[in-house]
Image (cartoon, rainbow, N blue to C red):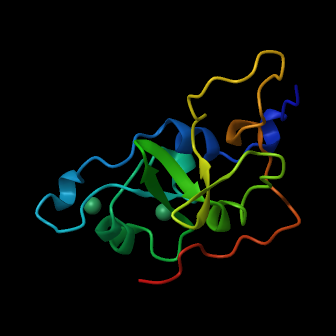
Amino acid sequence: MRRVAASLVPPWLEPLLTTSFFSVCSLHSDAARNERNMFCLDCGGAGVGAFCIYCRSDCHSGHRVIQIRRSSYHDVVRVAEIQKVLDIGGVQTYVINSARVLFLNERPQPRPPGKGRLPHVRDLRPSPARSLPLLLPRL
Ligand SMILES: [Zn+2]
Ligand SMILES: [Zn+2]
């Protein structure tokens, strides 16, 4: 199985995969869109977890922020966003609501015995050839 050297793994990857999303933001509990479904690639390695869209404009403007989406109780991220910062070649993607997405954690489905494990986000390495544009520059 392919294993990526720890030094190649961006510091935000493990926090991204272990953060739980979609709880209500305690700072913005009165706001309309206060679910914490954002993750900052610039701050995520420093222990900043999920935050809401208002936190984003308060604290993370100009940062590389990705938006987590939810599909059937699984956290997914759009391929269009994550592929800017990770080389996701070889990883299983799915089309959900006409958008190609990647499951942040492995989809709990039985695999045929003997086929082994498909490469997953955790196995990925960043693509140094790609620039790191701002994600989701709107707002
Ligand atoms: Zn907030
Ligand atoms: Zn940030």
Q: Nearer the viewer, residue 63 or 29?
A: 29
- Could you say where residue 109 lies in the image, as x and y percent from the top left? 59, 28
The residue depicted at 23 percent of the width and 51 percent of the height is: 24
- Could you say where residue 133 lies in the image, as x and y percent from the top left? 68, 75
Q: Nearer the viewer, residue 76 or 41?
A: 76
7 left or right of 61? Answer: right
The quarter holding residue 111 reads top right
Tell me the quadrant of the picture where the N terminus can be found. top right
Q: Is residue 103 above or below residue 37?
A: above
- Could you say where residue 15 lies in the image, as x and y percent from the top left? 54, 40
69 left or right of 121? Answer: left
Q: Is residue 108 above or below residue 76?
A: above
The quarter holding residue 16 reads top right
User: Is residue 41 shown to the viewer in this render?
Assistant: no
Q: Residue lying farthest bottom?
A: 138
The residue depicted at 66 percent of the width and 68 percent of the height is: 80
137 left or right of 60? Answer: right
Q: Residue lying farthest left?
A: 30
Q: Nearer the viewer, residue 131 or 108?
A: 108
The residue depicted at 40 percent of the width and 42 percent of the height is: 73
Image label count: 0
Q: Residue lying farthest front?
A: 112
Tell me the quadrant of the picture where the C terminus can be found. bottom left
Q: Nearer the viewer, residue 96 or 57?
A: 96
The residue depicted at 78 percent of the width and 34 percent of the height is: 6
- Could you say where residue 110 lies in the image, as x and y percent from the top left? 63, 23
User: Is residue 8 shown to the viewer in this render?
Assistant: yes
Q: Is residue 69 above or below residue 90?
A: below
